[in-house]
Image (cartoon, rainbow, N blue to C red):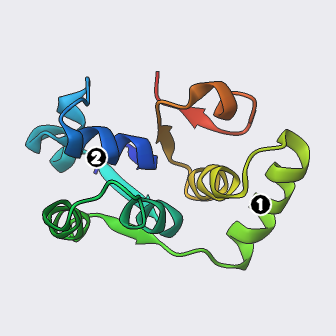
Amino acid sequence: MGLKYLYDTNIYINFLSGILKEDYLFSYDFLSENDILISSIVRMEFLSHPNIKPQDESFFRELIRQFKIIPIDFMIEDEAIQIRKQYKLKLPDAIIAATAIFEDATLVTYDKKDFQRVKELKLYR
């Protein structure tokens, strides 16, 4: 397997709404060559998004079956607590950052402004 990537919630929202600029992130070649992870908080954020239509939810549930979902355990919680304290991120963002760090994955997000402060985090471009 290639590299590990953890997609932020906004990547999925933009993909399903048709405004994702980086369509290749969901291409067969990219997905088959890399390990795509999903934080359980991303799953919760996306499925609870107020603009999600029932057909989008079904598609997303089908889409994530092919990726590894990373549950929030005590080690990720402890990392998220430290990130939240040190960098003042919102709790969901701290959990996403902690998951990426703990899994040694590169975070793919459109919210680079907040996440770039986390020095331990690898950001996609």
Q: Residue lying furthest front in this view? A: 50
Three-letter amino acid code of the residue under disc 1: Glu
Q: Position of residue 103 (x, y in %)?
A: 55, 58
Residue drawn at 72 percent across, 57 percent down: 91
- Is residue 62 in view? yes
In percent of width and height, residue 106 lies at: 49, 40
Q: In this view, does 9 lie to the left or right of 99?
A: left
Which residue is nearer to you in this view: 121 or 92? 92
Q: In the image, what residue occupies the spot 73% across and 78% down?
A: 74
Q: Residue, x 68% and y 32% (percent of image)?
A: 114
Residue 93: give its label: none
Residue 79 image-quadrant placement: bottom right
Using a 10 Å C-alpha cutoff, classify the residue at mark 1 as few (fewer than 14 neighbours), some (14 to 19) or many (20 or more): some
Residue 86 position by quadrant: top right
- Residue 2 vs residue 69, the one in the foreground: 69
Task: Look at mark 2 in the image and give the residue it sits on.
Answer: 34
Labels 2 and 1: the sequence-earlier one: 2
- Residue situated furthest right in the rendering: 85
Q: Where is residue 40 in the image (x, y as percent from the top left)?
A: 48, 69
Instruction: Tell me if label 2 and label 1 are in contact, CB under 8 Å.
Output: no
Regarding mark 1 in the picture, which secondary structure is present there? helix
**Of circles 2 and 1, which is in front?**
1
Q: Nearer the viewer, residue 98 or 62?
A: 62
Where is 12 relative to 119, above or below? Answer: below
Q: What residue type is labelled 2?
A: Asn
SS class of the residue under badge 2?
Answer: loop
Query: Which of the numbered marks, if any, corresponds to residue 79?
Result: 1
Q: Can residue 7 be seen in this view?
A: no
User: Badge 2: how crowded within 10 Å, few (<14), some, or many (20+)?
Assistant: some
68 relative position to 91: left or right: left
**Place of residue 80 in the rendered image (x, y in percent of width and height, measured from the top left):** 75, 59
